[in-house]
Image (cartoon, coloured by chain):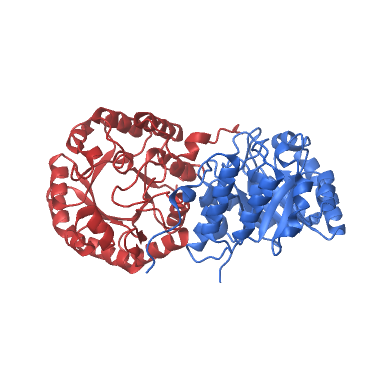
Chain colours: A blue, B red
Amino acid sequence: MNAVDIREVGPRDGLQIEEPISTEAKLEFIDALVATGVRRIEVTSFVSPRAVPSLADAEAVAAQLNRWQGVTFSALVASLNGARRALAAGIRQIEYVVSASDGHSRANVGRDSAASVALIAPIAELVHEAGGQLEVIVAIAFDCPFDGPTPPQRVAEIARSAMASGADALAVADTIGTASPIRMVDVLGRVRAAVPETVPGVHLHNTRGQGLANAWAAYSEGVRQFDSAAGGLGGCPFAPGASGNIATEELAYMFEDGGIATGIDIDRALNAARLISDLLGKPVASNLLAAGGRSVPAH
Amino acid sequence: MNAVDIREVGPRDGLQIEEPISTEAKLEFIDALVATGVRRIEVTSFVSPRAVPSLADAEAVAAQLNRWQGVTFSALVASLNGARRALAAGIRQIEYVVSASDGHSRANVGRDSAASVALIAPIAELVHEAGGQLEVIVAIAFDCPFDGPTPPQRVAEIARSAMASGADALAVADTIGTASPIRMVDVLGRVRAAVPETVPGVHLHNTRGQGLANAWAAYSEGVRQFDSAAGGLGGCPFAPGASGNIATEELAYMFEDGGIATGIDIDRALNAARLISDLLGKPVASNLLAAGGRSVPAH
């Protein structure tokens, strides 16, 4: 049986660029996401509340996660201090983001790319001491809004450093949604050559309409772990032009329609997308939500 | 050098579901499309003006096409009479659409699928006598809004009948935008096995967000001919839920960004999408138009 593993990042990447909504509203959203059947949810990030006010309630969200069973909840961090906060809040699955470009790294975390790479080892040590697992997400793996195209070899080098520094998993992120399938295959091929011991996941944005095509190209290269956000929410506040993760319901449709199991119920995924649209009080960028599922008579 | 051949169908499939715009506005749109560098444009269809009022000026549009050189203009027909009209208007590249399901075929042209297949031979004869070429487009190649899933073998049978009846080229159409990459690969594989002498093109809709993923899957299977519409316009008036062709500018971006030549200038394609949005007085469904091209500093 073919299967993929989708990580819902709506509560984190989906909401970080939005006006803050209440913790209670976030928990209602997470509840709707759990109901879809998705097995992994990135619920928040432990970053500066001044920098990302909409995720200032990270500890409050984390404190409520024992409501749900059978789902792995994770959080994004960008520093050693963020990792400490996440662990103290009970999170054991940590994503640490490293920008492959200096321009975005400085805008995002105030240090260059090499300095961010140097933090992988101490963060991994901290996470492992607490019994947790660390995934390193290589952001800006294709283009930087400040520095231009990212050399693919730089992405492969960071991937190798991450695994050598104790990371348990890797993901490659098209943070500003400029990648296309040929470049996706190129970068993934270099990463896989550099770290043959693991298959990276991918984190994709649909900013230029390329998101699902890139997801399919990644699947064809052996990738089985995908980030997506309900309703195609999202963006990075420190990467101009970064909007819209690939929509969970459209990603799940792409796989399920072809018999590739995601564990996600499409109708419930549409419900979750509708809910977050209502909670935010604005439409979301999901063609599937507008069209509805494949509601043709089944024979 | 890798290259693909994109046929712009905005003036036909893009406009058929819209409120009619003036012939002059259409010619302005066609002029903007020619400026993109695209080499093939489906400019109208010769069908009943009562059924498709927005294309009632087919003869008037055709009469103006000698303004432009170096572009192949084509028209869609759905009957022998439509083919006669198109040829009389000077069109020599004809697309004849055959629905693979009886339900859609009856709704679209008032006869069943087999009766539509039976018309391929006389239409091909007529077109060839006039020195033209005939492409058969197999519509509803994945799902029918009335009859449910289309048996893939039915699509392959129609393809074989079309080539045996004198068609010069073939395309497979996901008319209501329900296909996904695995099913795309399955149907294309069966069609290629049935008609090894030709490689079909594909006509895709982005109704459920799957359009470019399907295009990439088709490319991976050897397809090099793609239909798309500026700004992702379009839909079929006789197929409920059919909206939005894949957007030409996003399709061209997908290929050009990876070094696959389309002949299309992305900035000019964005101009054409912006123009038709203005002429229709409404936004179009193009993420690339909203985000802009890959405007990062080039190194």
Q: Residue at x 53, y 35 (%)?
A: B291
* Residue A273 image offset from top left, x and y in percent: 56, 49
Q: Residue at x 52, y 59 (%)?
A: A266
Is residue A117 at least partly visible in the picture?
Answer: yes
* Residue B205 image offset from top left, x and y in percent: 39, 49
Residue B172 located left or right of residue A63: left
Q: Nearer the viewer, residue A169 or B6?
A: A169
Residue B43 located left or right of residue B274: left
Residue B159 located left or right of residue A276: left
Quadrant in the picture for residue B148: bottom left
Quadrant in the picture for residue B169: bottom left
Q: Residue at x 60, y 49 (%)?
A: A229
* Residue B200 image offset from top left, x and y in percent: 33, 57
Q: Could you tell me how many numbered marks the image carries?
A: 0
Name the quarter where the N terminus of chain A is drawn. bottom right
Name the quarter where the C terminus of chain A is drawn. bottom left
In this picture, is A51 found above or below A206?
Answer: above
Residue that lies at the very extreme toward the bottom in this rendered image: A1
Q: Residue at x 56, y 44 (%)?
A: A277
Q: Nearer the viewer, residue B157 or A276?
A: A276
Is residue A7 at least partly visible in the picture?
Answer: no
* Residue A16 image offset from top left, x and y in percent: 67, 41
In this picture, is B234 found above or below B217?
Answer: above
